[in-house]
Image (spheres, grey):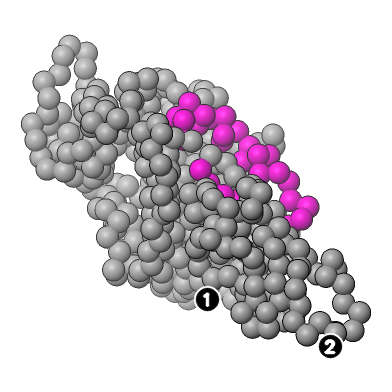
Amino acid sequence: MTTLDSPPTTVPPTTAGWTRHRDDDAIGAPPESPTKVPAERYYSPAFAQAEIERMWPRVWQLAASVDHVAEPGDYVEYRVGPYSVLIVRGDDGILRAFQNACRHRGNSLCVGSGSGLKELKCGYHGWTWDLAGMLRRVPARKGFGSLHLSDYPLLPAKVDTWERFVFVNMDPDAIPLADYLEEMPDDIAWAGLSDFHCTATVNVSVDANWKTIADGFSETYHIQGLHPELLRCVDDIHAPQQIWGHVGKSHQPYGVASPRLDGKLSDQEVWDSYIDTQGGRMGVTESVPLPELAARETVRDAVAEQTRTFYAESGIDLSRFSTDEITRLHQYNIFPNLSVLASADQLTALSARPGPTPDTGELVMFAMSRKPPGEPRSKPIDVRMTAEQATLGLVLDQDLTVLDRIQRGMHAPGFTHLTLSNEERRIINTHRNLERYLDLPAAERMTGG
């Protein structure tokens, strides 16, 4: 695989059972100078149009969960910018994707998601396809003269799955999804992500560019400023990063205070902060005394044991997972717009999508839950809301509150460039890939770094 960035040499190929080394940090080898990214990439209509024309039709992007299209006749529409892709589970059980346009005059065939489809019928003039995309009926066909049904199949899009996620790509010549994801599937294979299913998707409209949204889930540098509660229970410094190509990764240990606090917190205070920010993961939502720790045990051990106990009550066995595998968050950023957050007990995907203008976008959260063996799967609930209406939990709500302010600041006349640290190298990697897909001339590329 092509390596676009050099990770710290002490980062192992897989982090299952990872042991912290003091020199494994989020910065790695400091660059000679900061990386400068032109700010207009975040608000320029011309740049947004270039993304629409040259990037979005050519990249793999998360469109749905397998649970949205688990049974024959299930369908879901995926929209990004002006494009619409229809994903359908056929009568033969095969998952297919089509450009969501009637071959007659372009009407979208399906909107939203649903079940029970027997055919794909245009609601405008009645042209009808089977679920494999072959045209079967054209009303008043003789008016078209010599029209052969076989000449008008639905236009295909590429579709593939990884674990419980469905990806699409509108480029017929796109590389396979497995190649696009690079080392990521092997890197997280230990977690058994196939045991999760999607319970809900939450679509939040945001007054910010899709990159502004995605950047917020691409670095730990902001934790010290935006998430004071989280700072008390996560080591945001010893959070090694690795860049492969399309994919970048960071992993952070939870259940331990940030070294920035210089050891000033007691174990009980760290435990309380974990409860405040993510206690639901272990079934504890109100402050309770920290369980007594045996010799050589830590708060992380207590968090892991309480998490195992909580899941066992629902018939889910986490005993095979170590303390580190339960309390370390593995965060993958997949170009262009996806963040996957995974540990032994949790899986969340965050997708940032462009809105109708460069200053608007959408955050789509896929909430995944590990289920007991044999439990039947159900259709996810799909919810839409504004950023003001959203209540996604303390940390995500804090992330949402700052996005519109960042977007406004980008427009300041004197603010010409973002100045990025190596700690923000996953953001830098996003722009490196953007430059490649958009084939930007040297004068429009990043500098420094």
Residues at marks 2 and 1 touching, judged by CB atoms closer than 8 Å: no
Q: Would you name the residue on which mark 1 appears? A: 356
The amino acid beneath tag 1 is: Pro
Per the rendered image, the range of residues in magenta is: 164-193
Rendered location of residue 268, percent (x, y) = 12, 31
| Looking at the image, residue 135 lies above or below residue 104 | above
Q: Is residue 324 left or right of residue 74?
A: left
Along the viewing direction, whichever of 242 and 277 lies nearer the viewer: 277
Number of callouts: 2
Spot occupied by residue 41 in the image (x, y as percentages of width and height): 57, 66
Residue in the picture at 76% in, 77% down: 138
Residue lying at 61% horizontally and 41% vertically, measured from the top left? 181
Does the magenta segment cover residue 171?
A: yes
Q: Which secondary structure, mark 2?
A: helix
Which numbered disc, 2 or 1, marks the residue closer to the eye?
2
Q: Name the image quarter holding residue 124.
A: bottom right
The label number, if any, that marks residue 143 in the structure image = 2
Element type at mark 1? loop
In the image, farthest residue toward the bottom: 143
Which sits earlier in the primary sequence, circle 2 or circle 1?
A: 2
Percent from the top left, x then y, of residue 247?
58, 42
Q: Nearer the viewer, residue 403 or 391?
A: 391
Q: Residue at horizontal 65%, vertical 73%?
A: 121
x then y, percent, for residue 157: 70, 58
| Quadrant for the N terminus in the image | top right
Q: Is residue 303 left or right of residue 69?
A: left
In the picture, measured across the screen, residue 438 lies left or right of residue 412, that is right
Q: Is residue 126 above or below residue 6?
A: below
Q: Which of the two residues, 369 or 174, is positioned nearer the viewer here?
A: 369
